[in-house]
Image (cartoon, rainbow, N blue to C red):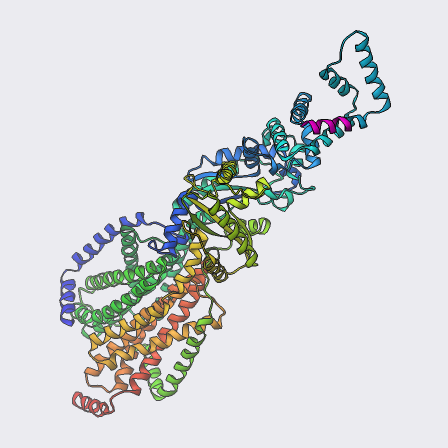
Amino acid sequence: MKKFFINIGDLISRRPKTSIIIILVMTLIFAFGLVKLQMQMGNEVFVSKSSEVYKNTKIYQKYFGGDSVYILLSGNKNDLISQNTAQEINTFMNKAVKIDNITGGTNYVNLLNAQLHNPNSTGSSLQINNKNLEKALMSSFTDKQQEQIQTKMENSLTSDQRNKVQAYMQSQLTTAQKQTLAVSAKQVTIKGQVMSASDQKKAVQKVLTKEQKNNIRNYTMNLLNNHQKNMLKKQMISYLPDVQNMKDSLLRKIIFSDKGKVSSQLNMLIPKNGNNVLIVLNTSKNTDMDTYVKMKSDIDKLVRKSHFGSNIKIQTAGQPMVLGEVKTSVMKTMVVMLSIAFVLMMVILLAVFKVRRRLTSLGVVLMGLVWTFGIMGWFGIPITLATMATLPIIVGLGTDFGVQFHNRYEEEYKKSRNAHSALINAISNMGPAVGIAVFIMALSFLTMFLSKAPMMQQFGMTLALGVICCYIVDLVMIFSLFRLMDRKNKPVKELNVEGTGISRFLSNYAGFVGKFAIPVLIIGIALSAFGFSVEKSIPIETDIMKMIPQGMESLKNTKELQKNVGSTTYITYLVKAEDVRDPMVMNWMDQFGNEETKKYKDVQDVTSLPTILKDLNDEKLSAQKSGIKHQVDSLPEIVSSTLMSKNHHYATIQFKINKDLSSSEQLNLMNQITDDIDVKHGIEVHPAGAQVMMLNGIHNIGANRTLMIIAGLSIIFIGLVLVYRNVKYALYPLVPIILVLGFSPGTLKFLDMSYNPLTTALSSLVLGIGTEFTILIMERFREEEEKGYSAIEAVKTAVSNVGQAITASGLTVVGGFSTLIFVTFPILKAFGITTVIDTAYSLISALTILPALIILFRKRGAKKKSIRVKEVKN
């Protein structure tokens, strides 16, 4: 391996300009991939595309669309429930449905209109049996319409009903009215004519007062059977104008028909008894980030151009609006992270890394970033909350590699004052050392492919890709640049690598650790054991809404929506059958929904075809197939389309659940409901939808974490055994890493923090970073040991020389990671805090635990050999 790197060093030394040109050309090629980068922030990043829940959700979205967008109107009920507002809602909806990927929507205006214009509607949703509403409706009709309604009602009466009405009408007549009617009848008789029934009716109507007419009409309506009432309601409904054209008084009578309160059928769309009005927009199956960004922009533009009035507050909410705003935040955050990372690392390098051209590696790492994210664009690896977090990590690690190469070159150049020999010596020694670390680091990152969450797999892939790209770019660019800069081989007096204060401190520190090796190891093991013991008690948070900036307007609006409307959290089940209108299917859905609502207190409501039929029609489900199909077909399309597919093969059952439940509690509830499913032959029921995907993500993120750790440790051990061909040398770097794996959960417990999709990846990150630190010290130790020095002297030299570079690079990595602390994304902030601490642990463990192990298990006979080597040199 060393010979291979000697040849590489010789090639770079002889062709530095060509090497730089090649890297620049490749950087340009990869840069074109940046424009191809896609962003994913939806729940699909938690669930594999091959999983059943993903496939079922795609079917669900195909027939029922994606998550809804909510427009919440707030204000005084007189302003909200008015003709002007109803007209503006109607205008707004007509424009909204023309927006790309908005497939329809629901509000109280179009819902009532759909029921009014539905020929099969009985009008029960308007509760026309309400006396006050009946009175308001009748008073809104013209005299001619009232006469037609009266005639329709009278014509539908049976003989018995007519006799009762006739008797009641007679009881209503006063003596004077009866005398008037008698005189009229006598006058007709004197003329030798017979008074027809029609004439008698007209005569009676002429003498009746308005109050008597109302009493007779009310009495007559009380005699009607259900069929007659429905016929009368249809007649009345046919005379009603569109909701947006109703007068304020009539509109409010209809809306507040339940004893002055909003009717139960409209509660969801008019919450807070009229102080809020909700407009729900349905979205298409397209759930990619770019779709949501454009959708949000179009809806916001439409809201700005609306004319609801200054007294009405308008808020847009829902997951599509939130995710549409996230992309802008992500881009801003990435720019902020990159800027802060470079400033912090620049300060650290200037303060700690006492060599010439100390900022070189920081400049070169930019090309490594272009390579990494350019390749991601070319190969379709998306930007997620996880891959976004790799930005400062890759910057930190890439700078770390550059610092290692830079430090060794300066050390060799100080000795030889010859750029060619310094370059070859540095590459032949540090190329394999850093290369081994990068190789094992990349493999440890790739263990994230054992995770069931695609986001974590992409996180591992991006990190592995990033460290490999940065290694190649750093190796070629840094040494090529130094070869050109030092081509005249001028001596530089200010070069001082071995004699810095940091190197002397680290040498003394290694000696101190050697004296107290046993206590150091006991303390380290005890702290790590505590961390492992509390790991299972640390909760996992996967609610996407809690991972994004809490100050986002659309997120605050969504929380306000839930405060006013109640829970908008639903666990949805997709029902499949030959025809979901079949009585067997309908009755099963009805029974299952009722049972689960009664069984679990956190299930607040259930919505399905049967519940809607019973609410709107105020009747039981028909036992006959033709009857139940008629009931379903009688539903307005804006209602049925959200509950049943047009081909009648699919239906939905939506359980409204307590919004205060944590993600893990929601997952448990969903699993309990799923376990309760006991379907008959011909029916399939599966959980589906965005919320279900998110809840399944909880399991996916935590799944296989132990397997990932075991696989990572195994890879490191096997790799080191193959490299060193010595089990003891393979175990030396492994022990400090294992201890750090215990320090990490202990820290989370101490800080009272939860795991999230990123912090669960810390084990793989610790394995990768810790491996590099320990391998670099291990490699230098072996190099010094081969010269004949004792274990103690070799460790002190390794820690003194490599430790300075490791400290500088470790601090730059910490500086890079710490930028995550300053971002507005809670998920990145938590990840930043823990990675900074864990990177510091890895650095301290490499400088403490590894020397203690080497010295404690050193070869006891090596000391005399070291003395003889010194005597020969003297």
Question: Is residue 757 shown above or below 162?
Answer: below
Q: Nearer the viewer, residue 538 or 420?
A: 538
Residue at x 14% of width, y 68% of height:
4
Q: Is residue 165 magenta?
A: yes
Quadrant where the image shows the N terminus = bottom left
Residue 734 is left or right of residue 819, and the answer is left
Specify the farthest residue to the top: 191
Percent of width and height locating residue 157: 67, 27
Residue 640 is left or right of residue 435, and the answer is right
Question: Is residue 249 shown above or below 339?
Answer: above
Question: Is residue 32 shown above or below 200?
Answer: below
Q: Main secondary structure of the magenta part?
A: helix
Q: Could you say which quadrant of the image residue 248 lies in?
A: top right
Q: Nearer the viewer, residue 245 or 395?
A: 245
The answer to whether residue 269 is visible is no
Tally of marks: 0
Percent of width and height locating residue 194: 76, 11
Percent of width and height locating residue 331: 40, 51
Q: Could you say which quadrant of the image residue 756 lies in?
A: bottom left
Q: Is residue 277 magenta?
A: no
Quadrant where the image shows the C terminus = bottom left
The answer to whether residue 673 is visible is yes
Residue 350 is left or right of residue 542, and the answer is left
Question: Is residue 146 shown above or below 486?
Answer: above
Specify the farthest residue to the front: 160
Magenta-colored span: 158-167
